[in-house]
Amino acid sequence: MAPPRTAAAVGERAAGLGSIEALMAQCQPRLFRFFLLNLRDEDAARSLVQDTFVKAWRSEASFRGECAPSTWLMRIAINLLRDHVRGGKYKFWKRAQGESVDAASLAEVLPSGERGAERILLARERVAAVWRHVEKLSERQRSIFLMRHIDEMELPEIAAATGLPLATVKTHLYRALERVRSGMRESA
């Protein structure tokens, strides 16, 4: 049964997570990057970001406050990504990836303090090289790698978001880093 949509009910719902608008403003860029880097399709990423907030709104009562709201949202996002990949939609997006976001444009999404055109070009080349190796990681390793190195999430936060033990997160991250480093050394 859907919760009532009265002004008082909206106020009560927002109290658990704080202002939903503030939470969206804070977490939307991170969620978008997470989905974009995993799927490499802007439309799918935008849809899944929206689905994340809709699901969070509908299940706000399940937020127990044991973690940060952003961690709770990331857990929802991970589950939605998993469902998206399993649902066969991923196969369509994988085929369409040639027409979607390329690795060079991903460099523009990443936060960077670099300015000059030469530095931007070098950053794009590095991102493209790293991305080629990140694409070869398993889904779980790739997600953990991106949460740690793109979203700069702490390991306990990743463990909470994925529902994995901290030691398992560390193992997946270590293996992901080794595969990316090894790939970078071989291609150099």
Image (cartoon, rainbow, N blue to C red):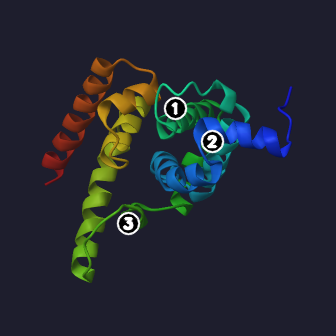
Secondary element at tag 1? helix
Going by the numbered disc 1, the residue's amino acid type is Arg
Which quadrant, please, contains the N terminus?
Answer: top right
Please rate how many residues cluster around mark 3, counting C-alpha atoms within 10 Å: few if below 14, some from 14 to 19, many from 20: some
Give percent across and percent down for residue 156: 33, 28
Asked if 2 appears above or below 166 in the picture, the reply is below
Image check: 40 left or right of 50? left
Residue occupying image coordinates x 22% and y 37%: 177
Q: CA distance from mark 3 to mark 2?
A: 27 Å
Going by the numbered disc 3, the residue's amino acid type is Ala
Q: Which label was assigned to residue 52?
A: 2
Going by the numbered disc 2, the residue's amino acid type is Thr
Q: CA distance from mark 2 to mark 1?
A: 9 Å
Q: CA distance from mark 3 to mark 1?
A: 28 Å
Give percent across and percent down for residue 35: 52, 47
Residue beneath disc 1 = 75
